[in-house]
Amino acid sequence: MRRAPIVITATVAGLIAVLEFHTRPAQVNVGTIPAAGSAAASPATTAPSLGSAGSGASPRPSSSSQPPGGTRTAVGPAVNYNYGVLSVTVTVSRTRITKVGIASLDDGGSPRSQMIDQQAIPILEQEALQAQSASIQGVSGASYTSAGFGQSLQAALHQLGMR
Amino acid sequence: MKPRPAAVARQPVPVVHHLENVMGTIVIIDVYAAADGGAGRPAGDLGRQLAEAVAVLHRADATFSTWRPDSPVSRLRRGEITSAQAPAEVAELLEHCAVARDLSGGWFNPWAMPGGLDPSGYVKGWAAQHALSAFSGGGICGVLVNAAGDIASTGGPADGMPFRVGIADPHTPLRLAAIVELTGTIATSGTYERGDHLIDPHSGRPAARAASASVTGPDLGLADALATAVAVAGEPGLDLIGTIEGYEALIIGPDGSRRWTSRFPIAADRTAPHRPWLPSRCY
């Protein structure tokens, strides 16, 4: 009995948010990053590579060689972290970071070793996608807490001329 | 491209989703609007509050970073200045650190780190907590500041709905070990964290008796410090947290086992509907 109003409230809030802020990019843009595969399979000295993080529904520019002010994406080098090797993908619009994700993750050849199907997973959503039914607003403690995440992130931002 | 799961698609959408590159990582600030969409709220108000929150994070980084050679904390570490000569926030933060050290039975101790004073285990949570306090006023249902996995929150994503936060599985990077219905804050520490090693203050050497430890409570600075303490201490750390009013802890052992204090807000079922009687209200 008491649940129905809650659901309606949530839907209305979400709808208003969508209506009023329709220019905000979609949160789950899972796209292919051709360059990420080779980057993740290589040691941490691999040269930074560029790739696309756009989805099929809303294609994004495929490299940082876009006109200034456009949306640009870069993939940082694959670096070691405590459980393997990861690389970070960053999308910026002008000087704002609009998306950060894990471009590749390889935990070292064990059976659960994975490349995330060569998809870029936004950091907020990666575990949500895995958990499927779990509607969550954040994740506490994750690969992106590691020093490796920070290294790959800063390198990707550097490619885009940020800091 | 995989279809987006229906349960995820129905989630409330934040009106502000801001990613800030600060403190060597990404801090995510999400603001969820009340059902009235902020009617009557002055235009630009939210933008100003976001700018203030971001400024708080950068000030904390500039003041407390041990990576920036010119930060007051770095100068303090090198003995170039005394704590009395440092900005007032440094003394304030160190007081908080001393409280956390005592509450944690010494398992969190910024004064016992190799290389000298290192309050980093407190700073990220402290900064996120202060950034959160930049937001106030009508039209906001909830705000969440996620500083690389240390999360400060107020309210929820919709009226009567608490924020739900996953705890990363330390053994399988893309899985969740648990889901928490959050009131306030949660911090998680583990061997995957910055620097890749947790230091045992009692020996000065890397040691972690849990794969990860999560602590919930009203203040993220203290939760951050206590999470570090429990990750180093292991199960005895749980008993310690049980004696601290308002704070709860969950640890994941090296073998994947999970143990938590009696009131840790773990969701019983990942698919369970939100419980309307939880004390989360739009404000």
Image (cartoon, grey):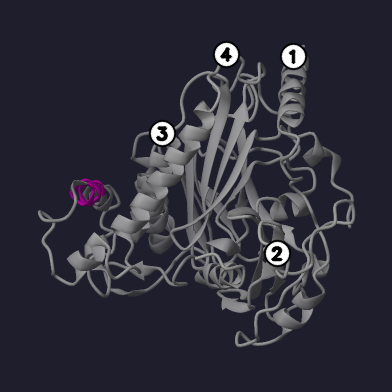
Amino acid of disc 1: Pro
* Residue designated by label 3: B133
User: Which region is colored magenta?
Assistant: B89-96
Amino acid of disc 2: Thr
> Residue, x 43% and y 59% (percent of image)?
B23
> Residue, x 71% and y 63% (percent of image)?
A67
Q: Nearer the viewer, residue B125 or A97?
A: A97
Instruction: Select label 3 or label 1 by which is in front.
Output: 3
Question: Do callouts 4 and 2 mark residues in contact (Cβ within 8 Å)?
Answer: no
Where residue B266 appears, x then y in whole percent? 59, 40
User: In the displayed structure, does residue A162 sit left or right of residue A29?
Assistant: left
* Disc nearer the start of the sequence (4/3): 4
Where residue B187 appears, x then y in whole percent? 47, 49
**Which element carries disc 4, helix, strand or loop?**
loop
Q: Are marks 4 and 1 on the same chain?
A: no
Amino acid of disc 4: Gly
User: In the displayed structure, does residue A105 sit left or right of residue B139?
Assistant: right
Q: Are marks 4 and 2 on the same chain?
A: no
**Which element carries disc 1, helix, strand or loop?**
helix
* Residue designated by label 2: A73
Q: Of the numbered discs in the image, which one, if any, rests on residue B40?
A: 4
Instruction: Select label 4 or label 1 by which is in front.
Output: 4
User: In the displayed structure, does residue B94 sit left or right of residue B280?
Assistant: left
* Residue designated by label 1: A5
Q: The disc numbered 1 marks a residue on which chain?
A: A
**Which element carries disc 3, helix, strand or loop?**
loop
> Residue, x 62% and y 15% (percent of image)?
B39
